[in-house]
Amino acid sequence: MKSVSNIEIRLDSVKEGLRLLIDASRPNSLFDAEETASENNEARYQLVEGCYYYYQISDSGIILGDIGENIIQPHKRTVNLGIIAPNIFVGTLSIPLLDRYTSEELCKIDLEVQSVKSGYRNDYRDMLELITEKCTDLLLQANSPVSQHFEIDYTKDSQTLYQKFAFIRSVISTDEFAEAIHRVVTAPVTKWTESTEEKDIRNVKRFSNANIKEILKGCKRTQLPDTHYLRSYGIDTLPERITTTRKKDSVDTPENRFIKHVLENFLQFCTGINDKAKEFGHKKMETESDLMIREIESQLHHTFFKDISRPTTLKLNSPVLQRKEGYREVLRVWLMFDLAAKLIWKGGDDIYSGGKKDVATLYEYWLFFKLLDLFQSLFEIEPKDISDLIKETPDGLSLQIKQGEFTALQGIYDSGSRRLNIRFNYNRSFSGKKKYPDSGSWTSTLRPDYTLSFWPFGITEDEAEKQELIVHVHFDAKYKIANLSDFLEQNTITDLDEEKVENRKGIYKNADLLKMHAYKDAIRRTGGAYVLYPGDKSINQKGFHEIIPGLGAFPVKPSKTDNGIGELKAFILDVIEHFTNRASQREKIAYRVFDVYKSPPEAENMVKEALPEPYNNNRDLIPDETYVLIGYYNSKEQHDWIEKTRLYNFRMGTGNGSIILDKETVSSKYLLLHTRGDNSSGDLWKIVSKGPRVYSKDDLMKKGYPSSPSQDNYLVVEIERVFDKEFENTNWDFRKLSNYSTGNSSAFPFTTSLTELMKNKVK
């Protein structure tokens, strides 16, 4: 395949001298694959996804027809000129050539669109093979009718037949299958067989009992000479030839007959598909089946198969078929082939239509099975609803993975110290514009490709949502990302403008990251959102200090030897370990969110008065959660003592005026003092001790307490003057506070919030 800057497609069969000229908009984006196109069943001239190309038809009366998705963009005035923009589509573009005036289709022009992934051809085959293999396992689990007789319904439309053929081709055109056949023909199972033949009696070296009888009774006999020693035994004649048996190594075993039977059935199927492709006019299916026919015929022409007869029975339980190298692989392919012939995949409509190889969509489906395997192994939970994935329908066995919610895994995970509900969903929709605390998105409806949800055992999912106890981790499949550093690069304003254009061409960078942010920020109780892409580098950005919340990307490649899922597995193990930590910061944040938002704010619960800004030492100054102790002093002498010692004492015990050590009292940050006759007070102090301490009567006397204490012990807090300018020259009417008592009880200490205190500021 050679890179070219432009191509000229000759269309003399339509009209003498007619030409289609195509110019590439960027280097190394247009190729002539004359030598390799037929081998890969692709069109000769090849474009690259995400690029665009200028075209011109030499006759102004002939134009290119529309094939949807804004791929063909003719010039507004000169319609035989325009742009071909493949966008994100991969595979064969069959573009109709039309008469401009009658709209009659003159012919079709095939152009191949390459993926930006260098190994996309192998990716496509490997992903289809895995899906087919997983469906085999699912059918066995679901006890579905896998033993039905193999039969293809050729009355189906060409698209359905092509889907079946693509499944089967992904199974039998693999290197592994070709290697399995090679192993069989080079190291086959053999058996000893006996063959009989008539031999000259003079050449027989050993005689059996049957030979002795022939010597006495055999026909076509010859007279012995008179001197022959056998005459002394009464034998005058001997037969000229007798029947002998000999053993030989034979490959005509039941197992080898099965191998030949498999190849002959594959050949019969491909021949039938080829005939039907010609009838439907499905050129792509015809070409691909031709290639398969030649490949299978070349295998059957091996001399190994000449001495093998047709099977009378198929012993699928043979130890050789189930265990010996080569044979077991062929048996596995045979079982998958039988399934693929029956399988109908509604989700495949997005992949096979128009001859395109939509590897991006296929990658999404392939990842579903890889993630299902991973989560099933980590959580040791059998998928309970997996039987719903394949259902028998009138037209075959229908694989139900299509865009729409599907719960693939659900159960209880026991870590030893904590039990968690686990749920793995495919294409779960989170409804938009839901009011708190309902689940879903608070903006528009969003639907991640895959969602893994955790919540504590013992409560329903709805209750876990309302109590902020559930965590969702989302994953999105992004086959198109070519370079992770591009995906996470910093963008300038110019970059973002260019990106809008590139996104329309199927080149995704920052938009994918923003989508992860959309999942993280819009879907309630989301702990993380991550891209899965077929690359090499993983990125796990932590929102704070712990594994979640976070954003990132993990490489998962369609490879049988190194799919890279290990890093994703390690991440999930870290998430599990995180959920076993009951003292995590995420748990604290979840509770705070629940506690703050569980009730709507009250309209009257507003503070618009000046307060110290919440930074440095005042960082925890939240008016609703900042408490103020209201204390009483008896005399000026006691107030002087408070000023001097920076101490304030409360009564202990159960008597009148004793302080109650509730949460608000212990955590109070301020002390407001008042005395007899006060209607308001501005005597505000800051409590600086970590909590009240117990002082005895003697301790207070040693501190110079102005009168003799009436109790044996007191609770004492350390205080200092408040110098915040927002509190200067300010008085508060403490009598209007909800906990204030009148009469003799007016001297009893009580607490209030800073919010309530500021509402009673004296104007």
Image: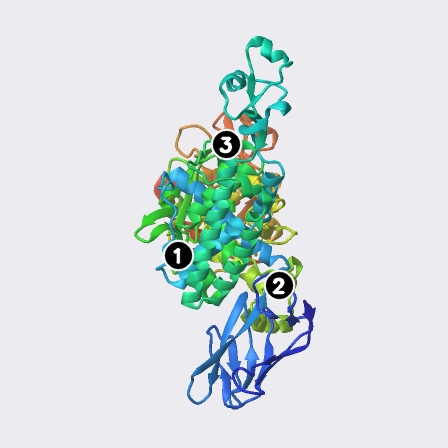
Q: CA distance from mark 3 to mark 2?
A: 43 Å
Q: At 63% from the left edge and 71% from the top edge, which residue is drawn?
A: 495
Q: Residues within 10 Å of mark 3 (few under 14, many from 20)?
A: few
Give the number of the disc on residue 346: 1
The residue drawn where x is 43% and y is 36% is: 314
**Residue at (61% x, 65% y) in the render:** 37
Percent position (x, y) of residue 132? Answer: 47, 48
Label 1: how many Cα within 10 Å (few below 14, some 14–19, many 20+) = some
Q: Which residue is mark 2?
A: 116
Q: Are marks 3 and 1 in contact (CB under 8 Å)?
A: no
Quadrant of image for the C terminus: bottom left
- Residue bearing the label numbered 3: 415
Q: Judge left or right: residue 79 versus residue 421.
A: right
Q: Amino acid at mark 1?
A: Lys
Return the residue nearer the eye: 713 or 612.
Answer: 612
Q: Could you tell whether 139 is left or right of 699 in the image?
A: left
